Image: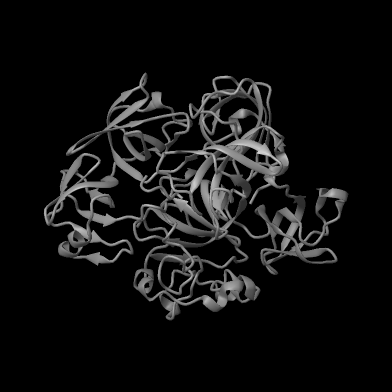
Amino acid sequence: MTRTFLGIVPALFFAMALAGCGGAGGAGVVAVAGGGSGGGIGGTGLTSSGTIDGFGSVFVNGVEFETDGAEILLDGRNVSEEELALGMVVLVTGSVNQDGVTGTASRIVFDDEVQGPVVAIVRDADGDSMLVTVLDNKVIVERTGTVFKGVNFSGLALGDLIEVSGFTDLQGRLRATRVEKKDTFLAGISEIELKGIVTGLAGSEFLLRGYTVDYSGADLSEVPGGVLAEGIEVEVEGTLDPVSQRIVASRVEQESALESRFDEEDVDVQGVITGFAGAAQMRVNGVAVDARVASLSPSNLVLADGVIVEAEGVWENGILRARRIEARRGRVEIEARVASVDSAGRTITLQLPGGSISVQVDSRTMLDDDTDRSDRLTLADIRPGDFLDIEAIRLDQRLVATRIDRDDPDDDVLQGVLEAFTAGDRITLLGITYSTAGAEFRSLDERSLTPEEFYAALQLGALVKVRDEVPADGIAEKVEFEFEGALDGERDFDDDEFDGDDNDDGKVNKPDNEDEADEPENDDNEADEPDEHDDEVDEPEDEEDEVDDPESEEDEEDEPENEKP
């Protein structure tokens, strides 16, 4: 695991057997049931909040919303539909047609979760995810699962000013659905946005996630009565003072719970499950859900904390009575060239040395173009020979894509359930057989395994990932076990619950040998920073648990902060 960190200086679940509530549109998804997932609703009003998965109008949770005449707000500004972007978590008010897959939006609202400088980066061993600290927010960023604008996964760097949209998990981390680089951060100049609970209110100051906020000159028109109170949730906009590291607020807005936008009607909430205590008691992005009578898709979906789902049902007495719950992220991964595209059948076939794999595209598939050849990628834009990174779910013996990224050509990668193997020789997954002669083998915790150790632990049904380096020839260069019930970054950056050590992987730890770190030499500037924002103390409340990870120290030495893993 590679760690990179920076002080703010003046210069600047998925858990299938296999397969917070922001104010105006943050962290939750509320949408009408649809997308071919169980019957239409005849002209029903709805409140819909979730990731924008595509355009052609605007696709949110499987429903294509016409936006003609809709009021569209981005961070409180009236804008046109053209300013909406893939991966934004939006709140839609409107109606849905009888077919359940089309509707009309009367209002669409987007509000990011945080905007600020990147002050720390921790990369996983695979190079598929990273934990990024933005102000006091821990953000899981995925190579395939996150949409990027103005920067790519490997290019994200310390000091970048970024805007993040996504879903909050049980540990308070934000799983980013979209990261947009605004500029290079300049303290005292760049606008930042931070959400949290007001504490320590005194005079014209209060504390927000460890930062002191000076709101003496702030616009309080979005706070009831224009008077702040201890314990309320707010969003602060302003700048970071280059000397005191205080936030000088230009605007303070009180945040409202997602549920406050619901009426007694059909709703559909997408997000991370938290507080799971059985089918009758859970929350999906902070919204209370009763799933006792809900059907599951896929049928082997396991509900648990950390799983990203869509819960469709009726809003009654402060609880979403779910009729159906669908998985929204998958653990099947395919990275390969396109052999053919069937636009009528909405199917993409990818070619690997050992055969081909077909993947279905539906109204919930998010299509992103990392090559920047298309601003709004559609199935019609994909051509034979294109290189795609695909994440998918197995439904009724079909693979259905949850994410499709068009990318620059790279190694072939295949991740799926093990279907057959010959010890010491070959493995088969998703119908594709690979020779493992000479391969590097890895355990779930990224330990190197001998071929004998790997095959001794191998069982049919295990989730396995194979990398076949360019030029792909059907001979695996790397084979590793993967967690069936966790997305990229879920276990890598867990705070001690799963990784078996006492190290808080989300913290930024100063190495024992300070000379070996990737920390910029800003000692003079850093001396002016308050202790609560010191490089090595990103989360003061967890300081007593912080220890250096000896296994990562070697990787930290002399590694460029922007080097692609």
Quadrant of the image occupied by residue 480: bottom left
Q: Is 269 drawn above or below residue 131 in the view shown?
A: above
Front position in the image: 230 or 538: 230
**Residue 215 image point, x, y percent:** 80, 59
Front position in the image: 482 or 387: 482
**Residue 196 image point, x, y percent:** 68, 58
Please report the residue visible at 28 percent of the width from the left and 62 percent of the height from the top: 443
| Mark count | 0
Q: Is 513 drawn above or below residue 57 in the view shown?
A: below
**Residue 383 image point, x, y percent:** 32, 27
Task: Please indicate whether residue 47 sits to the left or right of residue 334 in the image.
Answer: right
**Can the viewer see residue 534 in this picture?**
no
Task: Please indicate whether residue 322 sits to the left or right of residue 397 in the image.
Answer: right
**Residue 39 image point, x, y percent:** 53, 25
Task: Please indicate whether residue 364 sits to the left or right of residue 382 in the image.
Answer: right
**Can the viewer see residue 308 in this picture?**
yes
Quadrant of the image occupied by residue 298: top left
Please report the residue visible at 29 percent of the width from the left and 56 percent of the height from the top: 481
Q: Is 456 drawn above or below residue 544 in the view shown?
A: above
Q: Quadrant of the C terminus?
A: bottom left
Q: Is 429 drawn above or below residue 85 in the view shown?
A: below
Quadrant of the image occupied by residue 549: bottom left
Front position in the image: 483 or 544: 483
